[in-house]
Image (spheres, helix red, strand yellow):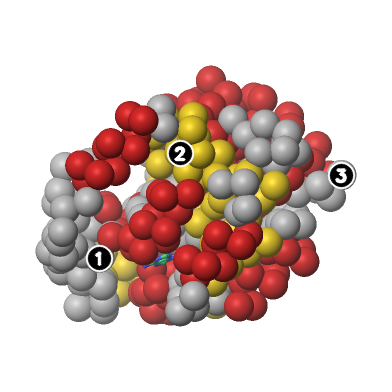
Amino acid sequence: NRQIILARRPTGMPDDSNLVMQEGAVPEPDEGEVRVRTIYLSLDPYMRGRMSAAKSYAASVAEGAVMEGATVGRVDVSRHPDFEAGDYVLAHGGWQDYSVQPGKALRRLDPQVAPITTAVHVLGMTGFTAYVGLDEIGRPESGETLVVSAAAGAVGQVVGQIGKIRGARVVGVAGADDKCRHVVEAYGFDACVNYRDDDFEAQLAAATPDGIDVYFENVGGAVFDAVAPRLNDFARMPVCGRIAHYNDTEAPPGPDRLPGFMGQVLVKRLLIKGFIQFDYRHRHRDFQRDMSAWVAEGRVTYQEDIVDGLDNAVDAFQGLLSGRNRGKMLIRVSDD
Ligand code: NDP
């Protein structure tokens, strides 16, 4: 049973001195438990937070423990009445070949209904994040301008498409020209600007002639700095993520812009609200109904970036934190 453990907490970008592959025993399930063979491991930016000892909304992974993560797999041995060998399941198996979990922690997947990978993307956590962040906080109205950062990524691609369904003008911000082209051509965004371009601020202004009513914040950093002055009165900003800062080792250089920004919060009556998707479990049924229909009708499409082999997981995770991924990042740990 190959396992990637958190050997040492990272400072800055994690590497293979922090995340180390080891060989462990294949675990045996007790009564009520199930052993699952991992097919896909979902790589997600929140994992960077779990590697840190800083206090957050969820506990850190302990040093020496297997890195956690959502997985799609197949039941290998079942000692739970609801599952049998061969069933496909959504699990939280972590960065390893085999995991043992209580049956109640698993959700059975039907590959006839949707590809199994969708359970960790468009019909799973990242799709749900986009859905609740927009519906509960962003609330774009028809004709309003919605800007989303990390637009080509797992959450961002879904945010933009829901924004179009809600009738908004949707502008993406991404870090590569091919990503920008893709969100316009494949997902129907009205425009997309590359924040790495020298004239990014001018491009953003040209793409948002009526200002910005909703900013779906995934990154922070220079993108936030460019967006903030363009927010309209009564704009809403769901704060979903701040990936530009996850590897920060010190405070950003001054001057302190917070008093100026808080002044704008007041005079423009901005709504800024952080959220974590699991606080909106009560919306899960609505999400399943709407998103399954949108995917079936082709109104929401999606892109996955699948890297082969658990031994490539650390490199792929670095890629996720630096923009190398093209869509939802997944590791194929074993063949179906
Ligand atoms: P993505 O698929 O979007 O991948 C991450 C992307 O972030 C990269 O491809 C890169 O795209 C972008 N990025 C990385 N570094 C920077 C930087 N310095 N400045 C700007 N962009 C950067 O990941 P997810 O869709 O899974 O996650 C997107 C965000 O949503 C993250 O912040 C994550 O933490 C957050 N999230 C929050 C949840 C919640 O409940 N609040 C749940 C799930 C995710 P590019 O090429 O455009 O730079």
Q: Look at label 1 and name its amino acid.
A: Asn
Taking the view exactly as shown, the residue that stands out farthest to the right is 297
Query: Nearer the viewer's eye, disc 2 or disc 3?
Result: 2
Query: Nearer the viewer's eye, disc 2 or disc 1?
Result: 2
Residue drawn at (53%, 20%), measured in percent from left and top? 282
Quadrant where the N terminus sits is: bottom left
Find the distance from the CA under tag 2 to the CA under tag 1.
Answer: 23 Å
Instruction: Look at mark 1 in the image and give the residue it sits on.
Output: 247
Q: Secondary structure at mark 1?
A: loop
Find the distance from the CA under tag 2 to the CA under tag 3.
Answer: 29 Å
Residue 321 place in picture, x, y as percent: 38, 68
Quadrant where the C terminus sits is: bottom right
Q: Secondary structure at mark 2?
A: strand
Residue 281 place in picture, x, y as percent: 50, 25
Residue 168 place in picture, x, y as percent: 70, 41
Instruction: Look at mark 2 in the image and give the residue it sits on.
Output: 237
